[in-house]
Image (tube, rainbow, N blue to C red):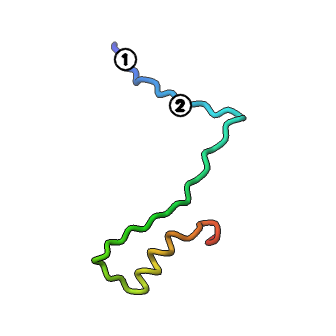
């Protein structure tokens, strides 16, 4: 009987001295100038640019 083996996927090991990469908080909002947004829509889009830590 033949057996099939899936190839092993090796994950990089985390060492104690490894530091996580800092999160990028640069939110860029690109709204086409041809769009006309209501104040509610503008506030909704702006809410995504706020710092997540302030919401918690």
Quadrant of the snapshot with the C terminus: bottom right
In the foreground, 22 or 34: 34
Between the residue at mark 1 and the residue at mark 2, the CA separation in whole angstroms equals 24 Å
Residue 45, quarter of the rendered image = bottom left
Badge 1 marks a residue whose secondary structure is: loop
Q: How many marks?
A: 2
| Contact? badges 1 and 2 (CB < 8 Å) | no
With respect to residue 56, does 24 lie above or below? above
Query: What is the residue that sits farthest to the top in this orientation?
Result: 1
In the foreground, 29 or 13: 29
Q: Earlier in the sequence, mark 1 or mark 2?
A: 1
With respect to residue 33, does 5 lie above or below? above
Residue visible at 49% across and 63% down? 27
Which percent across, then down, holds residue 2? Answer: 34, 14
Left or right of 29, for residue 49: right
Residue visible at 32% across and 72% down? 32
Can you identify the residue that label 1 sits on?
3
Residue visible at 67% across and 41% down? 19
Quadrant of the snapshot with the N terminus: top left
In the foreground, 34 or 1: 34
Which percent across, then down, holds residue 3? Answer: 37, 17
User: Nearer the observer, disc 1 or disc 2?
Assistant: 2
Badge 2 marks a residue whose secondary structure is: loop
Residue visible at 59% across and 67% down? 51
Left or right of 36, for residue 42: right
The disc at residue 11 is 2
Which percent across, then down, holds residue 9? Answer: 47, 28
């Amino acid at each position: 009987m033949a057996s099939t083996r899936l190839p092993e996927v090796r994950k990089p090991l985390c060492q104690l001295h490894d530091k996580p990469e800092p999160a990028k908080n640069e939110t860029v909002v690109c709204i086409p100038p041809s769009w006309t947004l209501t104040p509610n829509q503008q506030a909704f889009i702006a809410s995504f640019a706020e710092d997540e830590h302030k919401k918690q």
